[in-house]
Image (cartoon, helix red, strand yellow):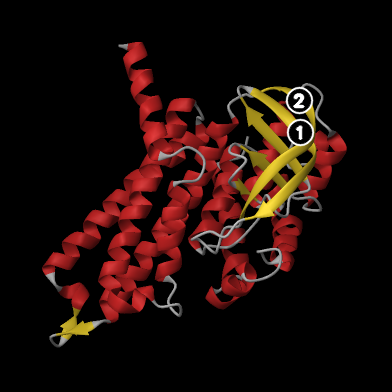
Amino acid sequence: MTTSDEREMLRETVAALVAKHAGPAAVRAAFESERGYDESLWRLLCEQVGAAALVVPEQMGGAGGELADAATVLQELGRALVPSPLLGTTLAELALLAGGEPDTDTLAALAEGDSIGALVLDPDYVVNGDVADVVVAATDGQLARWTKFSAQPLTTMDPTRKLARLRPEETKPLGADPGLADFAAILLAAEQIGAAERCLDLTVEYTKSRIQFGRPIGSFQALKHRMADLYVAVSAARAVVNDACTAPSPTSAATARLAATEAFNTVAAEGIQLHGGIAITWEHDMHLYFKRAHGSTQLFDSPRELLDRLESEVLSTS
């Protein structure tokens, strides 16, 4: 079991790597590259942090960590909108581990960062799909590894996250799906919270420096209230996501995703408005957070589907 001190050390290490190698210019260069992410940074994350090895047991070449460890790393990557194959790779590892006899060689390659993984929940929108070496699909409660597949890269609104349309050509059954959509929801929620926190920081910093009527706009009472409301929204959502990371369940996963999605969308929308016209220019990062917020909202299960699931759970227990 990872202690809170160990997890904080993990967070600080990732944050330091991101600060050094993933500034705004580096992030833009990464998502404009052929593979859509910085391969040298990915290597550093795998070698110095063991980012791709966190959920893999030690006897299979991994670090023997927990879902919350992977969530910690994704939160820091999300904070800077770092394009990375970590989400898809982690989900592919969890899928392989759910099989009766996990492929240890494949898991070891994923854990080392030599192979890239992807989990298919919706074949039309697969994270990492165009760069994946290892693909596992969760369909109707069953898992299958796609040993041969076709991949078509998609043009999306959010340039920081590459998606692809995948179609299977040869498949191999792995076993029952333990609820990988829930793990995906929790990890994505953690990433959203990191991005929401940074989005709020950028907005607060801007309101402190933007002068209107001879004073910073952040000094106006109305904006102070808006900043306070945003801080409360993000903090409350972060608490919900943290609970889901440490105690994953279908209910906690859906709740975390809804909370993180609402918080991120709200902060991104306020950020665009409070930054004014500069926020929608290509030179400013705020529009990238806005696009990430809306792109993430529709990834995996939609908010409507999550709400329907929670509603059915409430009705079944009442």
Split into 4 quadrants, where in the image is the N terminus?
A: top right
Q: Residue at x 70, y 54 (%)?
A: 130
Q: Position of residue 179 (x, y in %)?
A: 58, 27
Label 2: how many residues lie within 10 Å, few (<14), some (14-19) or many (20+)? many
In the picture, the disc for residue 122 is none
Amino acid carrying mark 1 in the image: Arg
Amino acid, disc 2:
Leu
Q: Is residue 298 left or right of residue 23?
A: left
* Front residue (pair 230, 167): 167
Among the two numbered marks 2 and 1 on one chain, the one whose residue lies closer to the N terminus: 1
Name of the residue lying farthest toward the bottom: 214
Residue 44 at what x, y percent from top left? 73, 63
Taking the view exactly as shown, the residue that stands out farthest to the right is: 105
Q: Which residue is mark 2?
A: 174
Question: Within the image, what quadrant is residue 121 found in?
Answer: top right
Query: Is the Cβ of the residue at disc 2 closer than 8 Å to that at disc 1?
Result: yes
Q: Residue at x 56, y 40 (%)?
A: 68
Q: Where's the C terminus, which quadrant? A: top left
Residue 229 appears left or right of 43: left
Residue 40, given in percent of the width and then of the height, sits at 74, 67
What residue did someone put label 1 on?
A: 145
Q: Is residue 130 visible?
A: yes
